[in-house]
Image (cartoon, rainbow, N blue to C red):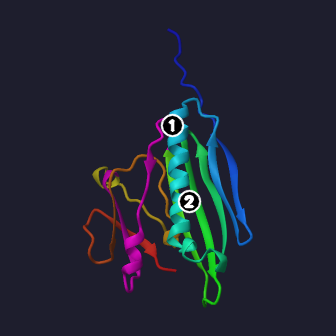
Amino acid sequence: MPMIVEPYLLPVQILPVRVTSPTVNLYYPQVTGLRDIQIQQHMNQLIYQQFHSIIKQQDYYENPTQTEMTGIYEIKTNERGILSLTQSNYTYIYMHANGLTITKSLTFDTRTGKSYTMNLSHLHSMKRWEFLTISIEEASAQKKAVSFHSMPTSEIFLMGPVSNIGITPMGRSNPSTTSCLRNP
């Protein structure tokens, strides 16, 4: 009987794209070399949309001559058909007390182009919290615990298909979840 071997998925190729002006020095990643051009274009479109949304969220277009902006990206994983990355921009507006850093992440299945995201923006409205409860439907169904110990919320990212993520303050969780993330 012949052995069926699945093709090994090589990491996707990433090219840095640089955007500059006298007060701007930004980099964002561009996926290249995928067999399916439509998947590659879809991934690049989502990466660029996120890149642009960070710039807009930092009010660059309100006062571009008074705004200094530096942006980088980091590849968190690029293996076995999964590409996970973060994009970070630091912005300082002249005469403001502090700058602002925004970091967002994207995780893709490179075979399908599907993007997996986890939105933590509602955490910023919480006045005070000590612990978070991470609840992953799949893990609860299998009676498995998932934990992230002493990790800042900006560093939480997921790889692979996860259907339902819930994050709740300690004390409002259900018994099948695991409390494990401490506010730094």
Residue 148, image x, y percentages:
47, 66
- With 154 as the anchor, is 171 left or right in this view? left
- Mark 1 secondary-structure assignment: helix
Mark 2 belongs to which amino acid? Answer: Phe
Up-down relation of residue 95 to residue 161 (above or below): below
Q: What residue do we see at 60% from left, 30% from top?
A: 8
Residue found at x 51% / y 37%: 39
Pointers 2 and 1 in contact (C-beta within 8 Å): no
Q: Range of the magenta residues?
A: 109-138
Residue lying furthest right: 22
Q: In which image quadrant can residue 6 be found?
A: top right
Count the labels in the image.
2
Residue 142 to residue 73: above or below: above
Q: Is residue 183 magenta?
A: no
Give the side of residue 6 with respect to residue 136, left or right: right
Circle 1: residue type: Ile
The mark that comes first in sequence, 2 or 1, is 1
Graded by Cα atoms within 10 Å as few (under 14), some (14 to 19) or many (20 or more), the crowding at tag 2 reads: many
Between 65 and 157, which is closer to the camera in this rendering? 65
Residue 142 position (above or below residue 66): above
Q: Position of residue 87 (x, y in %)?
A: 59, 61
Mark 1 lies on residue: 39
Front one among 147 and 28: 28
| Residue nearer the viewer, 178 or 106 | 106
Q: Mark number for residue 51? A: 2
Whether 124 is among the magenta residues is yes
